[in-house]
Every structure is written in C-alpha cells, then in structure tokens.
Amino acid sequence: MKRALNIVQWLVFLGLVAVVIWLMFRPSPPLDYKPEVWSNWDGFMTISYAGVTRDENTIYPSSRTLLSHMESLQAAGYHTIATEDALAFLEGRSPLPDKALLILFEGGRKETFIRAHPALRKLGMRATLCVPTVPLTSWDESCLKKGDIRKVCALPQWGVASMGGSAVELQETADGRKDHFLSTRKWLSREKRLENNDEFRARVEEDYRSSAADLAKLNGGPVPAYVYPYADDGRRAGCEPLMGAVNFNSVTAHYRMAFVTASNPFNPPGRNPYTLTRLRINGDWSAAQVLTALKRAEPLTDGLVDIGASDRWNRLGGARVVGYELKLDDEDAAWIRGSDLWTDARISVSVRRAPGAIAVCFARMLSPADCLRLSMDDKLIRLQESRNGVPVTIKTAPTPTGQVVRLDWKIKGLRSWLIVNDVPAFGPVPLEVPRASGVIGFESRGGSVALAELKVRPMHRRGIVVDSWTKLPLDIREGTTDYMLPFPVAGQAVSPQQCLDCIQAVSEGADVWPLLAAETNGVASATQMEAMMAQLNRQDLRPFIKGFVVAPSQADWIDPLRAQGFKIMHRVKAGESMLLAVTNQMDHVWLDMTGTNAMQAAGAFLRRHPPSQLVVQDESVIRRIPRVDQVVVWSEQGKNP
C-alpha cells in the first residue's frame, strides 16, 4: 500500500514538472504584427503604465487588471507596434496598422516585466520597456539588471526605450527640497552652492550619452526612443531657458524620438518626433475607461460648435465646463481633444476676463514653446509665434472696452487675420514659422477667464487650377489653399497679371504651384534652368512659389527644380505611370483621373506614402480616404467640370 502511495506521489510530482516545462516552453501565439499589409497614415496612440504589481492601486494595475486592459484593447481592434515602427511612420517611411497602439511600461522594475509578459505573450501583443540605466548595476534587486535587459531585447514581444541614466532620481535643491534631475540645478553641498551653467550642462549631457551607450550595447544596436521622467524636458513653468535647450540638444544628439507629455495618447502624422505624447493609465482604471480615453483622443474632423460637453476637452488645473461656458482660473488650461491634425483653422469665441487676467488662445500647438498664440490683456491683443521656443510678438491691436470681447481668428498657410467685435483688427499678417499641425486650446494667466459661443472649424486643403487668381469669387479664394496656374515655356516671361495673381494668392494664405507648360519636355539643361531662375528673380516671383507641377514626360526637370529649393507635385493621368516607390518622400502626387483608375492608383500610393501627399480630383476618393487634398479645375463659368 505504501509502495503504491509512493508511486502515486511520484506520478503527481512528475506531472507537475511536465506542466511547468510545458508552460515554460510551449509555443508562443504568433504576434499580431504584419507590416506588409499596413496602410494607416492617420497616426498612433501611446499609452503608458508606471508599472504592474500584485495588488492593484491608483498607480500600478494588478496583473489581472492589466490582462483585462490588453484583452479589451485587442477586442476593440487595436494593433500594437514598436518604437521603430512609430519612428518610420513619423519620418514618412512606412505606414502603420489600423488603430496603431504603442504600449510603454516605465521604470525598469523587475516585477513589471514578470507580471506584464504573460499577458503580452498570451495575446500576441508588443510593448516597450522604458529603462533608467543606473539601476541596472545597483544592488536594488527590484530593478532589472543588464543580463535581464539582454533577455528582454531577445523576446519578440518586447523592445526597450531609455529613461536616462539617473534622470528618474530626485536631487537636492538650495532650499533642501527634492526636484527633477533634468530641470533643476544641483546643490553642491561641499561647495555650498548651486552648480553653474557648465556643470549643469555637463551633468545632463553625460546622463543622455551614457544611457544611450549602455542600452545600445545591451540591445545590439541604438535604441531610438527616450521617455522623459515626470514628463519634464526642462521647459516646464519656472525653468530657465538653458535647461530646455540643454535637454533638447542632448536628446537629439543621442536619440531619434522622445516622449514628453503624459496626458494625451494621440500622435499625428508630421509631429516633431521629439515632442511626442503619451497617456499615463492609472492603476485602478477599468478596461472601459482605457477605451473611452482613447476614443476621446481620436482626430476630430468636423470642428466644434459651442463649448460642448466637458469630455470634449483635455483640462488642466481647475478648468471646467459650466453650462455653456468654459471657465479657467489662473494658470488653468484646456484644449480641444482630437484637434491634433488641424493646421489651418477658424476660431470664433466670446471672452470675458477678470481685470488683470490674460486670456490666451493657442493654435498649431505641439507644446507651449511650439505654437501660435493670441493673447489678450487689459491693453493689447497680441499675435505671437514661437521661434526657437521663445514667443515673439508679430502684431498687436488694442483691447476694446467692455466686459465681453468677440474674437474671430483665422489661420491659413503663412498668414493670419483677426476680427474683434465684428471689426477687422489686422491681417493678413505674415507668419515666419513653417506650417505645422497641432491642437487648439485656451489658457488663463493672472486671473479668471470665461469662454462662450465657441466655433472652431478646420480648413481642409483644396487646390484650384485657374489661369488668374482674381477670376475666383472671394468666397472660393478664402477656402483655397493651393493656387495652380499655367506656367509659360522656359525662357518666356510670366505676364504682369500672373505676377500680381501669385503675390495676391500668397497674401491670402495660398501656396503657389505653377504647372510646367506641356512644351517643357526633355532634358532640363543648365542654360534653360538658369533662364527660368533669372526670369523668376527678375520678376520677383521666386519667393512666392512653393513648387512646380510636373508630368511624367517632364521627369528630367525634377532634380534641377529640387536643387533650386522647389517642391514637386507629380501630375499623373489615366494611362500614365510613374515609379511611386521612388517618389521623393516630400513630393505630392496629383491623380488626374477618376473612378476605378483613381482608387487603384490611390491604393498603390498609400502603401508607401501618407494621404497628406496625395491630391485627387475624384470626390468619391476624397470621401473614402480621409486627409486627401482636393484639386479643382476652374471653368470660365465658375463651375467645376
């Protein structure tokens, strides 16, 4: 009997060993990762977890909660990507999957990896472990070590990003407080002083350099992404300009992308790769809350009429929606969710300020240091744009008397207009900073501000082919962003009327794209190009021309025009072909065709290039592919054929 019991015990033990071995070495489910079929150019979401632990709290989710998040995200159609995929997208080299999602786990804690890996492995998902490198060699057993990172990098579910060397640590300040490593001068206790500029610069630069070098050795190659601890890149309120400059110069020297803010998950196409955003997920959020947060951040295409519901806004401080007003106290801010892709826009709002308060409206905002601003105090309304992170005032108007002021602000291309209380205040005002997309938001400084009767509408790009800009009705010109005019054969002068048309179009915020004459074929000789440039310079037209529209038969003109600093738009008609695969990443392609031909050509283009570089005439294509530019050939009767 005893012998039989021993045999049973051994069988149970061997069975348990077999189960453990099976669990350890069973085949992983295939990754949900098929770059060959990706065609999404709309952007990607980024979410971030501070870690994962056994018992859920407000900061860290439990293993069970994390699994529920991952299962719900997968069921909702999200597809996970790596930081390398996000970078290729931002640089225009490759599209992403539909509903692309980058998942970050911050802090480099061993428990985080142990508890997150089973969920990723089970579902075939990917994530990025964000690692500070100094703890890799510390005695702290709660942190991953160098050998662990090598193993993580070898797993198909994982990639790594940097959080600096000691950048996650807090350091002592002159008054005994603890503050952020990257944005605070260190208190040198032996010398009883704060570090000077050179010492601050050397300390921060070395932290970036050493972390990049350490992770490159462990990863088997450079790690592209940096994740700022505490979402602090040295440009927060109260920081010296030196700190922002040192951090920016250091991160760009050693990394190719960086995540700064932690309150917005959406990163649109064209965003500066060093000002990326992520959304920190609270540990006690349900899966439904995670999905709702991502849904709210999706691009908004139709604009916003009135203040709307409070969930239409990302709010900081005590910003709140009360009835039909958005109310901001001192240093409160709010921006419109989903406005990340907006470049040109019209913003109308009624503003009520407390005495001494400054109301600020932001447009094209990537960060407070990278945006357009319209600020209003007791005396002046100021139009400002950021240049190298510094707001520069480019136009002012007096603030009218009265408790409520109505502002109508329009931004189109490199021009801006303002109407105050139904009276034109200024415009068109030239802007110097190149066009970029970014969110629209509001801020209060020095007191309370209330906003009401809000109407915000993005202006979608539309080009019109017409021989004279002034032939277009004013309402059509107002909504036209690209003026495409016939250009004479090389060597012939542009007419005085065309010169005036180009200047007028640019003054109204449109880009000018001459169409090379059909006779301009064959090899573009140096003599012909010199003659064309001399002609443009002689008539003072060159600064007003963004680029040229060329046909496949004019391909020999492309490189000479690029060499002169002009953009290229390829005009392709049905029956013509071009090597879309070798089209310059900054070029545009105009599909001068309709129906099935247009859809097939658009599909081929979008497998390699974003829709923002595609120009079509067929409205059915525009309806089916968001963010495609439209071109219209204007007839003498003012009708679109």
Image (cartoon, rainbow, N blue to C red):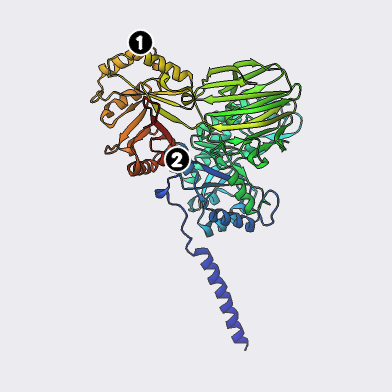
Taking the image as shown, residue 276 lies to the left or right of residue 327, namely left
Label 1, on which residue? 538
Q: What percent of the width, then of the height, locates residue 545?
A: 40, 20
Across and down, in percent, residue 585 comes to 39, 34
First of labels 2, 1 by sequence position: 2
**Residue at 48% from the left image edge and 18% from the top image edge:** 507
Secondary structure beneath disc 1? helix
Percent across and percent down for residue 308 are 65, 38
Q: Is 143 in front, or is 419?
A: 419
Q: Is 184 situated left or right of 17 in this image? A: right
Q: Quadrant of residue 502?
A: top left
- Residue kind at label 1, given as amino acid type: Arg
Is residue 239 at least partly visible in the picture? no
- Is the C terminus in the top left, top right, bottom left or bottom right quadrant? top left
Instruction: Assess disc 1: are there few (<14), some (14-19) or many (≥20) residues with their C-alpha within 10 Å of its C-alpha.
Output: few
Residue 406 against residue 178 in the figure, above or below: above
**Numbered badge on residue 88:** 2
